[in-house]
């Protein structure tokens, strides 16, 4: 009886609907707006479940990366602290004067080969560019030596012509002094300098690192500064014995100083990288947890809404059947 009434009313309304122009019955909303509203209202629980599964997988990955970074940090931190005793005697002997004015400067920028470690790479690049501006001039020359893939990718955009050497995958194997000394020897063979300025991140804690600049002067500049009473260390308080001249001794000291400073800088930067990656992965894991909580709430609300809709349809159908009797 109810279906007969519905068919009769439909036949009565059909001519009036067909007589109207199409534009009069078109929705005032655009198709994109209608699809957006329908997408929001008709979100399925399957979509939310898939999103929750993806977020859980990402959270597992970030937690695993945090644990790996913590393990590597413990392995490198002790070696970095021990390596500080290598370059400190050279600083006391030859001094460390980052503000010295020279004609040829080489900026050695240390960065990481991988990302997901916060802003340590952008920080050293900013410091390197600032040193370039400070030491540039009409009769001055500033060049770059890049260690690490991330700094190389950034510096190649605007300073490609000033880069004389780039080294990547230094941390592929466990770092040791022999490996870094070979790198230091390659740098000394490929560049001419009055001052080498090593830019790296000095490790303080898991959440704190300090951009640092260590300066290594050439033997000629050390001897010149010593003669004119420049700011040096305790070099003049020692007497030279043996057949070697002062220039030869300064040459050996400068090369050994550079390799020791580079070894410490590489280890300090590796510690800063692992600490920054731990902090970044911890933040990512917490963000994934918060997103998972919001998705769980959305899933429960969607499920409850679908259950309520089905109950309303069942009750309405039952009521229609009751009324039809």
Image (cartoon, grey):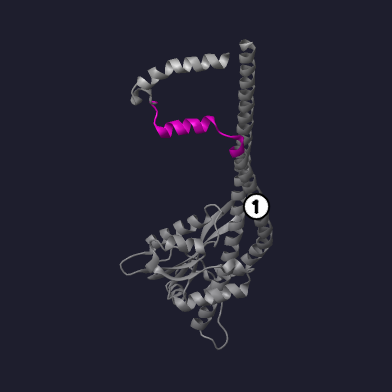
Q: Quadrant of the C terminus?
A: top right
Residue 83 picture quarter = bottom right
| Residue at screen point 49% across, 15% down | 8
Q: Is the residue 205 above or below the residue 78 in the image?
A: above
Q: How many marks?
A: 1
| Residue at screen point 51% across, 78% down | 250
Question: Over which residues does the magenta segment extend?
Answer: 27-47
Disc 1 is placed on an element classified as helix
Q: Residue 229's spot in the image, x, y percent?
A: 44, 71
Most prominent secondary structure in the magenta stretch? helix
What is the crowding at mark 1: few (fewer than 14 residues within 10 Å), some, or many (at least 20)? many
Residue 322 appears anywhere in the view? yes
Residue 92 appears anywhere in the view? no
Q: Quadrant of the N terminus?
A: top right
Nearest the camera: 169 or 265?
A: 169
Quick check: is 31 in the magenta stretch?
yes
Q: Residue 309's spot in the image, x, y percent?
A: 60, 24
In the displayed image of the protein, which residue is found farthest to the left? 138
Nearest the camera: 108 or 325?
A: 325
Give left or right: position of 161 versus 111.
left
Q: Residue 245's spot in the image, x, y percent?
A: 51, 85
Give left or right: position of 40 versus 45.
left
Q: Residue 187's spot in the image, x, y percent?
A: 49, 74
Quick check: is 54 in the magenta stretch?
no
| Residue at screen point 59% across, 49% down | 280
Return the residue at label 1: 66
| Residue at screen point 63% across, 15% down | 321
């Amino acid at each position: 009886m109810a279906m007969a009434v519905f068919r009769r009313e439909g036949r009565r309304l059909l001519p009036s609907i067909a007589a109207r122009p199409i534009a009069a019955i078109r929705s005032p909303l655009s198709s994109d707006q209608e699809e957006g509203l329908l997408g929001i209202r008709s979100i399925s629980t399957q979509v939310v479940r898939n999103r929750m599964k993806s977020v859980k997988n990402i959270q597992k990955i970030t937690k695993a990366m945090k644990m790996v970074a913590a393990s590597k940090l413990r392995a490198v931190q002790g070696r970095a602290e021990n390596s500080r005793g290598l370059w400190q005697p050279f600083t006391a002997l030859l001094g460390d004067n980052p503000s010295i004015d020279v004609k040829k400067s080489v900026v050695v920028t240390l960065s990481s080969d991988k990302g997901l470690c916060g802003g340590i790479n952008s920080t050293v690049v900013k410091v390197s560019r600032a040193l370039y501006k400070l030491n540039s001039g009409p009769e001055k020359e500033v060049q770059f030596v890049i260690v690490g893939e991330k700094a190389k990718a950034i510096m190649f955009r605007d300073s490609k012509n000033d880069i004389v050497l780039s080294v990547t995958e230094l941390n592929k194997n466990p770092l040791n002094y022999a490996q870094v000394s070979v790198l230091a020897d390659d740098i000394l063979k490929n560049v001419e300098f009055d001052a080498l300025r090593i830019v790296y991140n000095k490790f303080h804690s898991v959440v704190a690192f300090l951009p640092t600049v260590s300066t290594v002067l050439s033997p000629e500049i050390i001897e010149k500064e010593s003669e004119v009473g420049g700011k040096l260390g305790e070099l003049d308080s020692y007497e030279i014995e043996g057949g070697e001249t002062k220039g030869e001794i300064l040459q050996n000291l400068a090369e050994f100083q550079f390799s020791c400073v580079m070894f410490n800088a590489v280890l300090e930067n590796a510690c800063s990288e692992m600490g920054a990656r731990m902090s970044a992965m911890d933040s990512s894991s917490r963000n994934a947890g918060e997103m998972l909580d919001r998705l769980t709430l959305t899933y429960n609300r969607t499920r409850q809404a679908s259950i309520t809709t089905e109950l309303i349809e069942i009750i309405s159908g039952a009521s229609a059947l009751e009324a039809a009797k």
